[in-house]
Image (cartoon, helix red, strand yellow):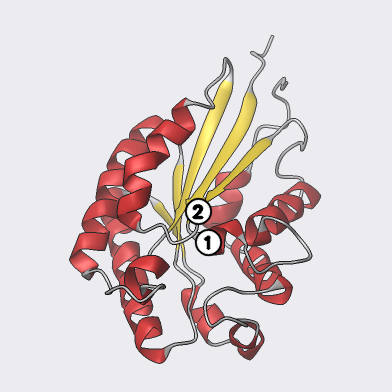
Amino acid sequence: MSRAVTHTWFFFGDSLTLGVNDDRMPGGWVSRLVLLGKMAGLYRFPPATFYNLGARRQSTADLARRWRQEVTCRQMPGMMPRLLFCTGVVDMAAPGGGQPLEQDNSLRCLREILTEAASLAPTLVVSPPPVADPAACRRIAQLSAAQAVLCADMGLSFADIHAMLAASPDYMDDLSDSLHPGPKGCAMMAELLLAQTSMRDFLRTDMDEKEY
C-alpha cells in the first residue's frame, strides 16, 4: 500500500513572483502556472499544495536568509517538497533607487541557496524576467545566462524564458510600471514555463500515489 503524501511546491522570489500587477489572478504567473499544470494532468489539485513566497524588493541575499525557515515552518508529516527560485531582478535593476548588485555577489548567494536546497528536495531555477530599462535589462540578461551556467555546473534544472519574454512586444508592453507584468504578461510567463520540459518534470507527480 502506498504511503500517503502531500506534494508541496515552494515558489521563492521577489515581487515578480508575487504577481503584484496581475489584478485578474492574485499570485500572478505562479497561480496561473498552477492552474495550467492541473489542466495538463501533472498533479491532483487539491490535495497538491503550492506556496507563493515572493516578497517585494527581495534580493538573492534576502532569499538566502529566509528560504530555509519558510520551508521548515511549513513542514508536516508526509510532505514531499519541491523548491523553485526566480531571483535576480532586484539585484540587477535595483528598484527604489539603490545600486545594482555585482553579478558575482548575486551568483554567490544563489549558489549558497541551491547547494542547500538541492540536498533537501528537487530544485528548479527560473530565469529572471526582463524589465523596461535597457541597461537593467542587459544586466538581467547577463545574470540569467550566468545562472544557467551555474545550474548546469551543479546539475540542476534551469527554465530559461528571459529571451523569449524580452523579444515579445506583448510582454514588454504589459510592464506598466517598467518592472511588473500585468495579467497578459503573467499569463505569457505561465504558458512559456509550462512549455519547458524542465518545468513539466518539476511539476509532474505519480498519479497512482495515495495523497492527502
Please say if 187 is above or below 2: below
Q: Quadrant of the N terminus?
A: top right
* Image quarter of the C terminus: top right
How far apart marks 2 and 1 lie (CA) works out to 5 Å
Residue topped by disc 2: 55
Q: Nearer the viewer, residue 160 or 173?
A: 173
Secondary structure state at the residue bearing disc 2: loop
Residue 208 image-quadrant placement: top right
Residue 3 picture location, percent across and down: 64, 13
Mark 2–mark 1 CB contact (< 8 Å): yes
Q: Earlier in the sequence, mark 2 or mark 1?
A: 1
Q: Residue flagged by tag 1: what amino acid is it? A: Ser
Give the secondary structure at mark 1.
Answer: helix
Instruction: Give percent across and percent down for residue 170.
Output: 67, 86
Number of residues whose C-alpha sits closer than 10 Å to that of mark 2, classed few (under 14), some (14–19) or many (20 or more): some
* Image position, residue 5 (x, y; %): 64, 21
Q: Which residue is mark 1?
A: 15
Q: Residue at x 51, y 84 (%)?
A: 166
Type of the residue with mark 2: Ala
